[in-house]
Amino acid sequence: MIKAGFERVEAIPGIMPDGREAVRVVGASWAMRQDVHAKMLEEAFDAGKRAKSKQAKSCPGEGLTSVRCPICSAVMAKSPVCPRCAKGQAGYKILCICTECDHEVYL
């Protein structure tokens, strides 16, 4: 446990006041050392920021269209069609989905 960055603590299993988690292993309570815990949190937050920035980028063309649904005349949302799927290989570039009845139209 010591080689893995843990230290023996006098605490009951659970979250300690400093935010570290104490666990009970073979009759003793253990928690990550302060420096290891801080480094792990920093890496987790950095990874979360990177993932969030990747998710924030939207694909070009996503949004609402001026095309109306042929069934209910509601506004349709558009998104790109994967060029590798069957519809994309058939030549379709845009998928329009009705915001009301979920009717799909490929363009």
Image (spheres, rainbow, N blue to C red):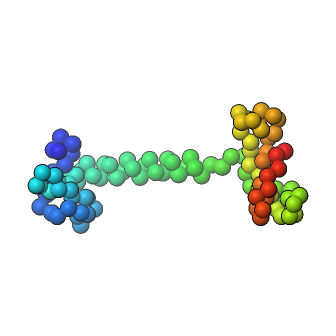
**Position of the N terminus by quadrant:** top left
- Drawn side of residue 91 relative to residue 42, left or right: right
Q: Is residue 39 left or right of residue 88?
A: left
- Residue at the far bottom in the pictured view: 17
> Where does residue 12 sit, x and y in percent of width and height?
17, 64
Task: Specify the quadrant that holds the C terminus.
Answer: top right
Image point (25%, 58%), residue name: 21
Q: Position of residue 2 (x, y in %)?
A: 15, 44
Any part of residue 7 in sight: yes
- Front-most of 74 and 51? 74
Q: Residue at x 14, y 56 (%)?
A: 29
Q: Viewer-proximal residue, 86 or 13?
A: 86
In the displayed structure image, the side of residue 25 where residue 80 appears, left or right: right
Residue sitting at x 75%, y 35%: 86
On the image, the x and y values in percent for residue 102 come to 76, 58
Q: Position of residue 24 (x, y in %)?
A: 17, 56
Number of labels in the image equals 0
Front-most of residues 88 and 11: 88
From what the image shows, is residue 65 above or below residue 50?
below
Which residue lies at the image location 39% right of the left edge and 50% below the top edge? Answer: 44
Residue 61 can be seen in this image: no
